[in-house]
Structures are given as C-alpha cells and as structure tokens.
Image (tube, rainbow, N blue to C red):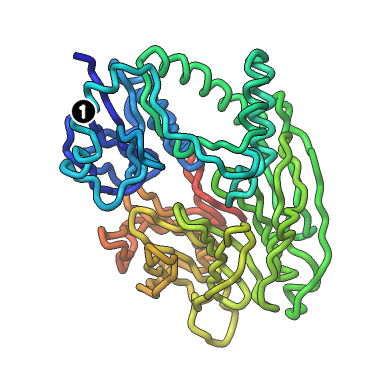
Amino acid sequence: MAEIKLFVCCHRPSPVAEHPLLVPIQVGAALAGEHFPGFLHDDAGDNISGKNRSYCELTAQYWAWKNVKTDYYGFFHYRRYLYPDMNAKRPYRIAGEPTVSLLDRLGFDQFADFIPQCDLILPKGEDMRVPVREHYAKAPFHYGQDLALAEQIVKERCPEMGSAADEYLSGTVCYFGNIFIMKRQVFQDYCGWLFPILEEFDRRTDTAYVANYESGSLTVVGGATGDMGVLQQLSYSGSGPEPKRQAGPHIHSSWLSPGGGELFAADLGADRIYRYLRNPDGSLYPNPRQPSIPFPPGSGPRHMAFHHSLPVAYVTAELSNQIFMLQFGADNTAMIPAFWDAAQRREGMVLTAHLQLSRRYGMLYACVRGRDELVWFSVEPGSGLLSLRGRRPSGGRFPRHFLLDEETGDLLVANQLSGDVCVFRVDPSGDVAPTPVQRISAPSAAAVMRLGAERPADWAC
C-alpha cells in the first residue's frame, strides 16, 4: 500500500483531526516562541523556517522535500483541506472544526484508495473574471512588480515554460490555496524547480533602505551582483507644529511590509508615513493608491510593526506619546481607526520610542523615554485592538530600544543615558517581571538586535 502524508500547515495552535493520513506541522517554528506539542516543526534538519514571514507554507514544503521520504506528499492549511467530492464548488473549504467524522463524510474514508490513482491533485480552478496578474496585484500586500520579476526569472531559467506562464497569468482562472497532493517524483521535480527560482528572486531583491534623520532623506543601497552601491536617494519637504523637532522632514525609520513588496518610511518631522512600491532592482516609487498616510499634527511617527495575520500595523508617535493603529482596507489603503496613550502626561521630556508585537504572548510592547518605562498592551485576536496590560520601570535611564526574544522570553532593554542593557523575564502570560535579572554595561546603548538570524528583529536608530 502506498504511504501517504498529508501535511496540515499551522502557524498557530489549531485543531488537526487524528486521522491516519494527516500530519500536523508548525510553520515558522524558528520564529515562534514555542514548539506546538504533537506537531512536526519546520525548523528541524535542513530547513528555511526563518523565511516563513515571506515564504509562508512554503517553509513546510521545503522541509518535507529535504527531510521526508514518502510515496505521496500533500499540503493543506489549518482551515483548508482537499477532499474528494467532484461535485463540490470549492472542494477545499470545510465548515466547522475538521473532525475525523466530518472528514470521513467528505470522502476521507476513501481517500487512501483514490490518491494512488493520480499523479497530482489540485483544487478546482475558479474564474475570477479578471486576469491572474491583475487579481494578484490587487490583493493586500501583493505587488505586481514582484510577480513580474518572478515571471522574468522563470522565463530566463526555463524558456520552454514562457508561453505556459503567459497563458496562465493572462487568463482569468485562478488556483487558490497552494494546497495539493503529489506523487513523490512529481513533488521532487516541482521543488527542485521552485526553490532555486525563489532563491534567485531573493538575491535580486537584496536591498537595504537607510533612513537619514538629520537630512530628512531615504537612501536605497543594493546590488544584484553583490557589489553594494547607492541606487536611489529620496529627499523630502514639509514640517510640523513643533518648532524644535519639526522644523523640517526627519525620516526616522523605514519598514518593509509582510512579504517585502512595499516600504513604509516614517517622517517624524512632517507627521506622515510615505508608502513606496519596490521595483525589481529594489528602487522605490510612490504607491499610486496612497502615496502617504497623514498623522495628526504634532504626533511625530517614529517606529512601525505589522500584525502577523491581520491587515493591521501599529506606529509609535514620539511627540504625542501615542500608539496608532493602521487598518488596511480591501484596496490596501490605510486609515487610523484607533489610538492609545503610551505614557501618562507630565511635565518635561517624555518620548515614546520603539515597539514590538509578540505572536507568542499576543501582546504589543513599547518603551517610553523620560518616564523610563516599558508598557505593554494585549492585542485582541479578531480586531487587533489594544488594551493596556501593564507598565514597568525600564531598569535604567532613557530606554531607546528593546528586543523581546520570543524563544527564550527574555526582554533586553537598551537604556541610552545610563549606558546599560537590562534583561527582564517575560512570564507565560506575557507580563514583564518587576526587576531585571541581569544588567550589561553598554555605554550609550541605542539598539538591540539579534546577530546571525536570517531576519533580525526589527530595529532602527
């Protein structure tokens, strides 16, 4: 009898039926704070788990390609399962929790006999009435230039596939979900074709974006051949109502969107975040749908963090000491539906600095200089709305930056004026311990980052 493994990809703990065909696997395990019990994990053996933020479930496919031998490989999502109902309009959507009884009613009791009759099983194509290229580019955080570069690489490496790629991308029938079942040789051939293309895509988009606070400019540095040089220099104008801090533009930081197709540049001086799409060489051009996002006068947007699954981002406002929520609509334009105070008002200098979202704890953490404290909020899973959870002294003076290590639960705070990095423990509920467990001398500490990670923790200074 053929051996069949249908991997169910989960980025968060999810119910997976104890069915003999199903194998639950945690994706992005290298970036998570814990390994889900009873799951396989895509950070074992030969893996690219650290790329999960941009590769999504492909990190599980790579892991299975390199580490598992079976006769048939299948890949489902925690909420999408292929099932053998030829009359279903979308035979990959299920209603309710995927229990064994539900799956058997959908045909899983016959699946083990059906699968070996096929080389490849896919969802039915769906006619979206618009070309695939256009449909892709209109989706939130999907960018036409990324698809164009991938298409270019395919045609360079596999010119015999050029006409098929054109035919599919110009047509209106889409195949959704990246879910399938493949015979071993088909799967091996597919992965041997796919992942070198993605590696080449990554190489060509290897670019650095440098925010220049004093000059109020943004510099694009890159080079596909490995010779880094300045590709582009962007200058800005504008000011805000705070004459000492907002006499002109001050680009404080820049942030790539999930998947890396768009760049957001925070201008503290002009109360605005600029939005750019990326060309294949990494250079930028304004997002035509929304070239910039205005913030309230005198707020001073500084740092930004994207939610891992909701179309939501958060921004610290240094001057107004607030945290703003950005919500991206169906057309990918952003609005500000809510904001929260990061610090209690008082006389003297109070400046909110860095923030970080935690998938492990479901929290948003921030640091406030002047008050010299850490503050954290619980994040409502469905809406992304925040609720104040707690505050703690930062252990030193002027906490400019911090890093929460999701794996260990250590929170490292860079206190600039006291010249130290304080290490706090975060308990299983996400709360920060009252006092640091370690203090490391670090004169003028301005930022903390992880060395050697595939994707370092977000930071800017």
Q: Nearer the viewer, residue 409 or 47?
A: 47
Q: Nearer the viewer, residue 171 or 264?
A: 171
Q: Nearer the viewer, residue 168 or 437?
A: 168
Relative to 314, is 197 above or below? above
x, y (%) of residue 320?
Answer: 60, 78
Relative side of 255 to 224, left or right: left
Report if residue 221 is visible in the image: no
x, y (%) of residue 181?
Answer: 36, 26
Q: Residues within 10 Å of mark 1 (few under 14, many from 20)?
A: few
Relative side of 162 to 82, left or right: right
| Residue at 39% in and 29% down | 180
Quadrant of the frame with the N terminus: top left
Report if residue 80 is visible in the image: yes
Q: Nearer the viewer, residue 158 or 34?
A: 158
Relative to 111, is 318 above or below? below
Q: Secondary structure at mark 1?
A: helix
Relative side of 146 to 449, left or right: right
Residue 227: which quarter of the image?
top right
Residue 395: which quarter of the image?
bottom left
x, y (%) of residue 6?
Answer: 29, 29
Q: Amino acid at mark 1?
A: Gln
- Return the residue at label 1: 110
x, y (%) of residue 19?
Answer: 18, 35
Quadrant of the frame with the C terminus: bottom right
All told, the count of numbered labels is 1
| Residue at 22% in and 24% down | 112
| Residue at 50% in and 53% down | 442
